[in-house]
Structures are given as C-alpha cells and as structure tokens.
Image (cartoon, rainbow, N blue to C red):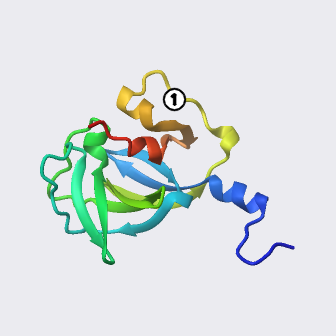
Amino acid sequence: MHEAGTTSPALADEAAQMVLTLTVHGQLCGVPVLSVRDVLGLQSITRIPLAPPEVAGSLNLRGRIVTAIDLRPRLGLPPRDAATPAMSVVVDVGGELYSLLADGVGEVLSLDAAERAPNPPTLEEAWRQVSLGVHRLGDDLLVLLDVERLLAIAA
C-alpha cells in the first residue's frame, strides 16, 4: 500500500515513458508528459526586445509571465506561415514555465524505452543537440526532445 500523494515505482516508470506528441514543420516530435503543464491555442505573445530569434516573446498564463520559445528557429527551420497559428505547450523546467510553440499538438503516447533508437547520423546538428533518440511509429519517425537542452539557448 502507498501513502496518499505518492506514486508506485511501476507507475512512475510508466509515466516517464509517456510523451505528448507535437509537430514542427511536418516532423513528429515528443516531449515527456511529466514536464507538460498545459496546452494552449492561439495566444497573445509580447515580443521581447533584443531577444534571440528563438525567443518569440512572453505570454500571460493565469497571471504568470511565461517565456515563449518558437521551435522552428530553435531547430533551424523556416518561419511558420502567418496563416497557421502556433500551438503552445507549456512545460515546467526547474519550477519555471516555458511555452514551446509548435505547429500542432497531437496525442499522448506510451513509448517503450527499449524501442528507442539512437539519433540517425543524418539528423541535423540542431536536432541532434536536443534529441534523446527516435522511435519508429509505423511509417513515421518520432524525435524525442530533451526539454532542458531545448531551452538552453545560447546568448
């Protein structure tokens, strides 16, 4: 029996394998569901002067200021079409909230860690730096993103 508010090790292991899928420029990606705090639609984002290109700005989430990181420039991809609004995946890293701007948000999947493959040698450097590996899902390849490395933006 476990005390209230605690999680059994088996459940913690299972949750650690759960990922929220998102797409960036047609590429299927996943972020660990334990780091996700919210998924938002179109948000008003305020630009931050002199910020790096991947910092889209900041948004207000229930009275809390959240830094918005656009995954397209962060991963060396072309800008999003202005007609396509970005979806926002709010993640918690070290008690700070960040919004990851993606082209779309999918479903929560349970992935078997034993089926994770290392990054392919042809994966672009920007992706290799932030990828924990890849999972084959039918005909698609899901890139598992390391949220902490994704947020380590060079000044």
Instruction: Identify the residue shown where x is 46% and y is 66%.
Output: 37
Three-letter code, disc 1: Asn
Q: Residue at x 30, y 77 (%)?
A: 63
> In front here: 24 or 149?
149
Residue 124 in sight: no
Badge 1 crowding class, 10 Å Cα cut-off, few under 14, some 14 to 19, many 20 or more, is some
Rendered location of residue 81, percent (x, y): 17, 51
Q: Kindly state the secondary structure of the residue where label 1 is placed.
A: loop
Q: At which x and y percent is residue 10?
A: 77, 58
**Left or right relative to 57: residue 119:** right
Q: Residue furthest top?
A: 121
Who's the residue at 14% across and 55% down the image? 82
Q: Quadrant of residue 137?
A: top right
- Residue at image coords 20%, 43%: 53
Q: Which residue is mark 1?
A: 119
Q: Is residue 105 visible?
A: yes
Q: Quadrant of residue 84?
A: bottom left
